[in-house]
Image (cartoon, rainbow, N blue to C red):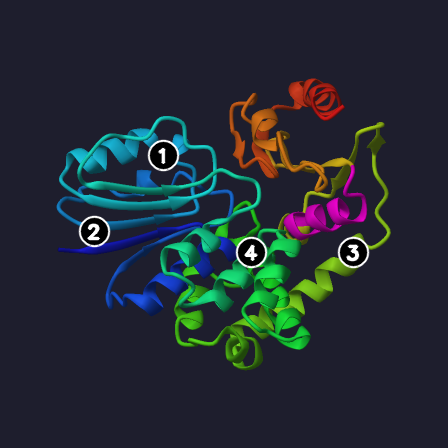
Amino acid sequence: MHSIDVFNGDADGICALVQLRLHAPRPGSRLVTGVKRDIRLLKRLTGVVNSELTVLDISLDRNREDLERLLAAGNRVLYIDHHYSGALPVSSRFDARIDPSPRVCTALLVDRMLSGQQSSWAIAGAFGDNLDEIASAHAKETGLDAEATRSLHEIGLLLNYNGYGSTLSDLLVHPADLFIEALQFEDPLVFHRDSSLLEKIRRGYHDDIKRVAELQPMRTGPAGRVFQLPEADWARRVVGVFSNQIARDRPEMAHAVLIANQDRSWLVSVRAPLASPQGADALCRQFLTGGGRAGAAGINRLASQDLEVFLSRFFQHFS
């Protein structure tokens, strides 16, 4: 039976799959991934029959039609995710481990499934998903010291940063290559020290983050702030990390970050208030290409004529 691993190209998806494959190696498994916002990954699987699929960190609701097609073709599917799913398919070939709670991520769900066998990788994934307090508490529970915890935080930060972009050409490292390298390190702390790909991402991150140090909001309301970044590859790379950073600066407020797409639509990242991480997905799903999870969501292409509608709903939604 053929094996296919389908995973989001961000920190959470990569760290979730690293845990699984350290636990149960599948040499030669086909890898299907992409930029963080490319979540309709199951549509790439055409002509796949009688195979073993593992799907990580992409919304079931956005992949429903293709998932049902793959199940009907005799494939077995393990689906682990923390985004809104809607109704689950009923099939003996379908195993779902889905929890949309705002205080979990896919890497933590895998950690739960494996009874903590690769917890350090799960902690890195949680840091990458901006669950810093939960990740830090988990690190303390597992006996990690402050230096090790900082290293896992940087892994999560850098893997997540690398996943952002409109196309793979925006990224510094292809997510599949990053997963393959990470899998060579059972201990993520050794990965942090020795990985040449992580060092490449680290240099790029420090160059990019300097560009947004003094950025001011374009619009502010009682419950939220909205920022705009320029239409540039560096801005598309840094948008996720920047969104998390400003959310941490003002945890009582919601945040949105806008970048103009080449077709004059808008790429939108939304963060619910960290003090009450709810509602980001509900807001973004009101728009055609929107989705995500309760604490963090986005819209891939917001039509230019809908910008003011979005801004009005954003401030109203979080007020």
**Marks 3/1: CA–CA distance:** 35 Å
Q: Which amino acid lies under the numbered mark 4 shown in the image of this protein?
A: Ala
Question: Residue drawn at (72%, 66%), measured in percent from left and top?
Answer: 206
Q: 154 or 309: nearer the eye?
A: 154
Kindly give the residue lying farthest to the front in the view shown.
141
Q: Quadrant of residue 171?
A: bottom right
Q: N-terminal of the two: label 2 or label 3?
A: 2
Q: Return the residue nearer the eye: 97 or 186.
A: 97
- Residue identifier under label 2: 52
Q: Compute the Cα span from label 4 to label 2.
A: 26 Å
Q: Residue at x 43, y 58 (%)?
A: 111
Task: Identify the residue position indicated by label 1 in the image.
Answer: 63
* Of 304 and 184, the residue lying toward us: 184
Q: Amino acid at mark 1?
A: Asn
Q: Amino acid at mark 2?
A: Glu
Q: Which residue is mark 4?
A: 126
Span of residues in magenta: 239-252
> Which mark is on residue 300?
none
The answer, for residue 99, to whether it is visible in the render is yes
Left or right of residue 286: residue 243: right
Q: Is residue 220 above or below residue 287?
A: below
From the top left corner, tell me how far across and down residue 243 is, in percent: 70, 46
Q: Earlier in the sequence, mark 1 or mark 2?
A: 2
Whichever of callouts 1 and 4 sits on the residue coming sooner in the sequence is: 1
Separation of residues labelled 2 and 3 (CA atoms): 44 Å
Query: Can you tell which of label 4 and label 3 is closer to the viewer?
Result: 4
The residue carrying pointer 2 sits among few (fewer than 14), some (14 to 19) or many (20 or more) residues within 10 Å by Cα, namely: some
Residue assigned mark 3: 211
Residue at (23, 30) in percent of width and height: 90
Q: Is 31 covered by the magenta stretch?
A: no
